[in-house]
Image (tube, grey):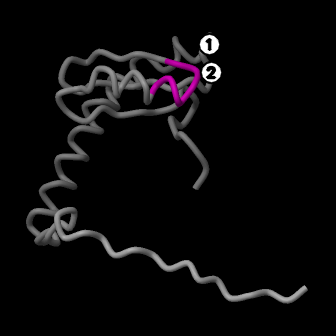
Amino acid sequence: MVKTPSTWKPRPIPEKYKKPPLSPKEKAKQEAESEARWQRCRQIFERVRDELMETHYNWYIVIDPNTEEYFIEENELVVMQKLLENPPQEESVIRRLNETGTCGSI
């Protein structure tokens, strides 16, 4: 069997969707905000993890850092659907209810 070369080529990104690169200062600011958000959510996660792990092991937990409210779902697609239906004011944090809180393997 002879392989023919692929003719597929990526399309260029239209100008209206391109974003200017972040300055180092802006990038550091975003990273600091992300870390602060995770620290607020981590406190909530640590507080409820053990109790919820008993009955909902490896389910997803979505935590809103502003209101400290959370919801849990077994299916990741349902989690995403709920977030699309009711978007939070600030980015929420999604974790897994397990010993590490990771959602996948690295």
Please, is residue 99 above or below residue 24 in the view?
A: above
Question: Looking at the image, which residue is at 8% across and 67% down?
Answer: 25
Please, is residue 67 above or below residue 98 in the view?
A: above
Please, is residue 46 above or below residue 2 in the view?
A: above
Q: Give the mark toward the camera: 1 or 2.
A: 2
Question: Looking at the image, which residue is at 25% across and 31% down?
Answer: 40
Residue 86 is marked as none
Between 98 and 7, the one lying in front of the other is 7
Residue assigned mark 1 = 54
Residue 57 is marked as 2
Q: What is the quadrant of the C terminus in the image?
A: bottom right
Between 63 and 19, the one lying in front of the other is 19
Instruction: Tell whether 54 sits left or right of 89.
Output: right
- Helix, strand, or loop for circle 2? loop
Find residue 2 and report its horizontal and vertical position in percent.
Answer: 85, 89
Instruction: Tell whether 73 sits left or right of 23.
Output: right
Residues in magenta, as a range: 73-79
Between 65 and 100, the one lying in front of the other is 65
Q: Is residue 103 magenta?
A: no
The kind of residue on which mark 1 rests is Glu
Please tell me how crowded label 2 is: few (under 14), some (14-19), or many (20+) other residues with Cα within 10 Å: some
User: Looking at the image, do the residues carrying marks 1 and 2 touch, with CB atoms under 8 Å apart?
Assistant: yes
